[in-house]
Image: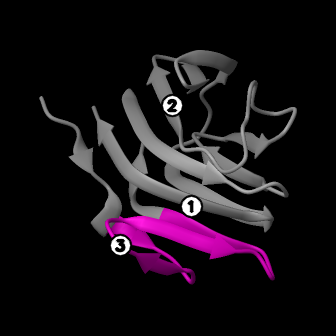
Amino acid sequence: GMPMPLNARLRAKGRTEGEGVIDVTADENVVIETSKTFDKDVTIQFEFLPDEKCNNDLYIRGNKFDIKKGGVKNLEPGKWHKFEIVVKGKKIEFKCNGQTQRTGKVKKANPLGIRTEFGAISFRNLRFKG
């Protein structure tokens, strides 16, 4: 079926602009998380736009993924990137622009969390299926 949009299902201290774009410049640690808890197989997709100083984190199913230079292959500041998280069975896979970045083991059920640590990052078209 069609992926369901998560844009309307976010709790955030940041601001939402335009069409589901979450644009947070980190003056402090801000955590944005989905109101939905993920506890089964799921595919989550979104686009993100990092700035030069981007060093932000994703949390899902007991795994942390750093969105930063060195953490994401071919990360280009100022350009929109497509990101995908695939949870299947006990495996989790993080992909950027179709390229596997890292795999891990699924742990606890939890919402998708986005933590702004350093630098600005924008998100749009956040969707899930599963």
Q: Which mark is residue 18?
A: 3
Callout 3 secondary element: loop
> How many other residues sit within 10 Å of disc 2, few (<14), some (14-19) or many (≥20)?
many
Extreme left residue here?
1
Magenta-drawn segment: 9-33
Asked if residue 40 shows in the view, the reply is: no
Quarter location, residue 16: bottom left
Quarter of the picture holding the C terminus = top left
Residue 84 versus residue 24 in the image, above or below: above
Q: Amino acid at mark 1?
A: Ser
Give yes or no for contact between labels 2 and 3 (Cβ–Cβ under 8 Å).
no
Q: Quadrant of residue 116?
A: bottom right
Q: Earlier in the sequence, mark 1 or mark 3?
A: 3
**Circle 2 residue:** 85
Instruction: Identify whether 92 is placed above or below 68.
Output: above
Identified at 60% across, 15% down, the residue is 99
Mark 2 / mark 3, whichever is N-terminal:
3
Tell me residue 122's x, y (percent). Answer: 56, 61
